[in-house]
Image (cartoon, rainbow, N blue to C red):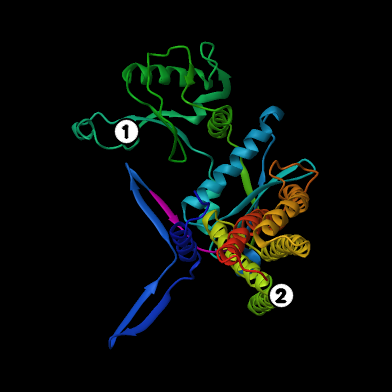
Amino acid sequence: MKLFKPITALILLILIIWIDLPENVQVRFNVGGKKVNFTINPLVVDVPMGGGRIFREFKTHLGLDLQGGSHLVFQADTNKVKPADLQDALNASRDIIEKRVNFFGLSEPTVQTVKSGNIYRISVDLPGIGNTSQAIQLIGQTAQLVFKEEEATDSAAIATDSSFLLRLKKDTGLKGTHIKKAKVDFNTQNGQPQVGIEFTTEGAKLFEEITGRNIGKPVGIFLDNFPISAPVVQQRIPDGNAVISGSFTVDQAKQLAVSINSGALPLPISLVEQRNIGPTLGQAEVKKSLYAGILGLAMVLVFMIGYYGRFGIIASIALLIYGLISLAIFRGIPIVLTLPGVAGFILSIGMAVDSNILIFERIKEELRKGKDMEVAIRLGFGRAIDAIKDANITTLTVAFILFNPLNWEFFPQFGLVRGFAATLIIGVLTSLFTGIVITQQLLRLVYLRGKKKI
């Protein structure tokens, strides 16, 4: 079976172009004297799923330097937090803040912890947001961890088709303040990770009453109104200790424990800085940067076509496909594009062209040795792949260090640097695919069907 069948490739190309479309594309034409006028928008996925839905809107997200927004800095009060719990509390606070501002529709916030000496702060960048009063109020709240049970009503008993999470509405009175500690441990029988909870004296009494009246029923654990677990009660628990078990990985169990601890160990934060930021570059500078990128790409295409002829045309087509795929990935993840991010993308274009040049030169060497086109293409790709692989691995290594996914303090932790690294990583990986797979398929399609010579 061939790697790409024409129908499959065409469907994928149409899907990618649909994702990449700008908003409100007007299509107007005449057919048989009749006017056709309709609007095409980028792809939106909205699929009902059980009691909820899967929703994904594909659009370009711009950073503070391109569209402006707000910058907030909160200082964390760590005086009452044990050193062993400090990092977990900071990470939980950061995650809760990001969840809150996303829940209220703020576009792709950048939330990160910043340490300066013994002072811990959480910075929040909200691209496209001018009025931040509601966001500040939400962010400043202490995390609310609550336990809920089913309402003992006829309507709740009859609604068997609805999700059981929707039926967990009754507040039990048990909250995060009743928890001493949540930690990850392992089931002694099967070795599976689970989360152990230790309640305070008052919490233990409440928990005993709750488990006693809910045997065989689920009790929901909600953090900021988001369900994080709904274990089914197996028996009355009088000793103030509980276990949440399930099909957890170690990381999932740890994340659940951190979420619970964020309610049990709230980290007070206070707003110390607030700024409304206009686009750093300004509309004129953004247009200049765009024109420079287009001009640079056009010059690359002219050089490739002028120097390599039909090979260059194939490389140009592959490069355009590369651009479409990269933009679709940026919108799908989504990636917040800043000017450094755009620079990373443009740099990856150079990597894509470099791969094509290596491949074409190897093919030309084989042709000069008297090999036919089919053998030259096969040998040329085989000999170029090692150089392409080594060059891209070194680039990806540097980009990984700049992105710093593990938040090492001795590496950069700034959003703009990470934006550059993220687009560079995506661009390099995409260029590997288009430079090797797409270019090879186009060469075979053009030259090997008719066994033509160049």
Residue 297: numbered disc: none
Q: Residue 454 occupies which quadrant of the picture?
A: bottom right
- Residue 18 inside the magenta-drawn segment: no
Front position in the image: 333 or 149: 333
Q: Which mark is residue 164?
A: 1
| Residue 147 located left or right of residue 141 | left
- The picture places residue 219, in percent across and down from the top left corner, at 38, 26
Q: Can residue 278 be seen in this view?
A: no
Is 296 positioned to the left or the right of 129 in the image?
right
Up the image or down, 378 lies above or below 164; here it is below
- The amino acid beneath tag 2 is Gly
Depth order, front residue of 206/130: 130
Say if residue 86 shows up in the picture: yes
**Mark 2 residue element:** helix
* Residue at which label 2 appears: 296
Q: Where is residue 178 in the image (x, y as percent from the top left)?
A: 50, 25
Q: Within 10 angstroms of label 2, few (less than 14), some, or many (20 or more) residues? A: few
Badge 1 crowding class, 10 Å Cα cut-off, few under 14, some 14 to 19, many 20 or more, is some
Task: Check disc 1 and give the amino acid type.
Answer: Phe
Q: Where is residue 79 in the image (x, y as percent from the top left)?
A: 69, 35
Residue 72, image quadrant: bottom right
Q: Which of label 2 and label 1 is nearer to you? A: 2
For the record, the magenta segment spans 54-62
98 vs 351, nearest the viewer: 351
Q: From the viewer's perspective, is residue 341 above or below residue 98?
A: below
| Position of residue 34 in the picture relative to residue 104 (left or right) | left
Query: Can residue 59 be found in the magenta stretch?
Result: yes
